Image: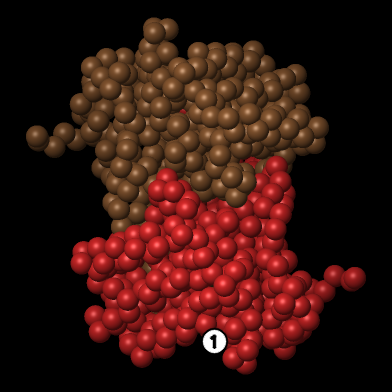
Chain colours: A red, B brown
Amino acid sequence: MAYIPSRDLEPRVLAGDTRAIARLLSRAETGAAEAREALDAMFSHAGRAHVVGVPGVPGSGKSTLVARLAAAVRRGGRSVGIIAVDPSSPYSGGAILGDRVRMGELGGDPGVYVRSMATRGALGGLARGTLEAVDILDAAGFAMVIVETVGVGQDEVDVARAAHTTVVVSPPGLGDDIQAIKAGILEVADVHVVSKCDRPDANRLIADLKNILALGAETTFSGSMVAAVGNASGKVVSDPTFAWRPPVIATSAIRDQGVAEVLDAIDRHRAMLEQSREIDARRALIAERRLLSAGEGILRDQFERNREGKVAALVEQLKARALSPHMAATRLLREIAVGGGT
Amino acid sequence: MAYIPSRDLEPRVLAGDTRAIARLLSRAETGAAEAREALDAMFSHAGRAHVVGVPGVPGSGKSTLVARLAAAVRRGGRSVGIIAVDPSSPYSGGAILGDRVRMGELGGDPGVYVRSMATRGALGGLARGTLEAVDILDAAGFAMVIVETVGVGQDEVDVARAAHTTVVVSPPGLGDDIQAIKAGILEVADVHVVSKCDRPDANRLIADLKNILALGAETTFSGSMVAAVGNASGKVVSDPTFAWRPPVIATSAIRDQGVAEVLDAIDRHRAMLEQSREIDARRALIAERRLLSAGEGILRDQFERNREGKVAALVEQLKARALSPHMAATRLLREIAVGGGT
């Protein structure tokens, strides 16, 4: 296949051309400089989709939930795009998880688009590439875009926070230690899903989550995730009339239970955001995160690009302890900005 | 207690004054601007300690291992500093894990210093604060500095990679799904420890790890972590005569087994680094990571500082989709650099 410049892909993506979408997604994934303008254009065309983040630890059953959720969205007549993010590793080439979303039931339906993305290499970049992928599916006209992430670590939390509605999937029986890993992700939930509720230990987890939520509401949370994040970051002010309380929904893939309730909660959440001024606070929060992600992306790109030059010279100074990391980084940032941050 | 300016803490820290160390560590943890010069000075005085990274999932038994390792280091006559990093969450205030390192056996020994650090808030910053804490203990004269991290996510991988020797602790019985979370951390191991080897399922994990290592040696790894990281990032060239193969060591806290072997492996690894030119490649790698961490730290600090001003104006442009995140971030970087990146 001949190489098609990204600017020529632009109108095709906007028209919903699946092949063009696939190509531009690949370029967002690898952070191709050639695609910069087209990706910026995607952002300008995006903004209509309902973006739903679904973080959960591996084995939580989130892929199954996402597949069933997508089928339910389709039955309601809306189109849906799915971005599934895998942990990457030089060891595994991202393949260690093996069992990617099994989307058999949705195959051949043009109203569904599924894309599995690797996280980028040693220098990170998950957040930026994933969020640009969301822009592409949004601009291509998908009514809902679901982003499924592994949900551990700062990058995943950032991605989850960049959604209008975040659905956190927790399976029973992982033990307190593993649940603790997820602590950073629990408070960004607009909807809690407890998966595998055919298992007897699911009830304890449901009770635990409800307790945590009750606790949160009494202290900093006041029922609103944006209020909580706003408190944590100190700036984003939420609408005090926004009275969303994250529901805890029991699901079971075996019993085919709970999916309609999850979709209903997602839609109700969006409607409540729109009815209050909360949607504005949420959009500001998302914009802040994207600005920071993009800044970190530029920094990493420039770092890679100047590795043999400026970076190598500064590294020598660090090795000799003639400059501190802070002093060296200040110089690097100045040179990047003067040299043009593209 | 009266506030002591950081520059006055400097000579006291270098003399090993425990109270001064504690104060400066707190300022590194919070990223206090006032401490900038003192922290830069710490970096210039550091460089003698053997820095050992110990990542592992919660419940892996890494805290127990670190405590016993520290006791073994002390019996050998060396001093040892420990930095233990907790996941932080606006929900828990970092306290959700509850059971911090139990260092009872080491209490009252001036040759040991233990510090538990919270990870910083919503905008990250784990890597920078932790690495500056290592500088402080290094400059204060501790012969070995052990950094214990939860070991999931990019930040933790960065911290693990900024050590001379990385000891990855894996417990048996977590299941393939949870092991997969750790994929990103496994390949940075110089020494693998399988904990809780009194359990019958430990043998399978030991065999699995040995298989993975054999596989890695045949493909990209050639037995060297730096070679692997170098391949992944494309630049750092390792010494081809460096023939370290990560050992897999079985430990059991109940049976008091394996700690001496782990310490021996750590010391042998350091000796082999020093004997080959590999130490130089490793130092370059660490310097690169620190430069990038510091750059990201400056970006985040400036972001916080200008939240009401420049950042808010750019966020409005993003919300209106008049600027893409990339375009807005390019402007922000330019203004940060021109405004002075301190």
Name the residue carrying label 1.
A48
- State the image coordinates of residue B287 (x, y, percent, origin top left): 54, 34
| Location of residue A303 with respect to B143 vertically, above or below | below
Q: Which of B213 and A214 is in front in this view?
A: A214
Secondary-structure class at tag 1: loop
The residue under the point 38% across, 34% down is: B84
Q: Which of B94 and B119 is in front in this view?
A: B94
**Is residue B44 something one can see in this rendering?**
no
B7 relative position to B165: left or right? left
| Location of residue A305 with respect to B199 vertically, above or below | below
Instruction: Name the image quarter holding the C terminus of chain A.
Output: bottom right
Instruction: Name the image quarter holding the N terminus of chain A.
Output: bottom right
| Location of residue A136 with respect to A267 vertically, above or below | above
| Location of residue A129 with respect to A265 vertically, above or below | above
- State the image coordinates of residue B86 (x, y, percent, origin top left): 37, 42
- State the image coordinates of residue B24 (x, y, percent, origin top left): 27, 33
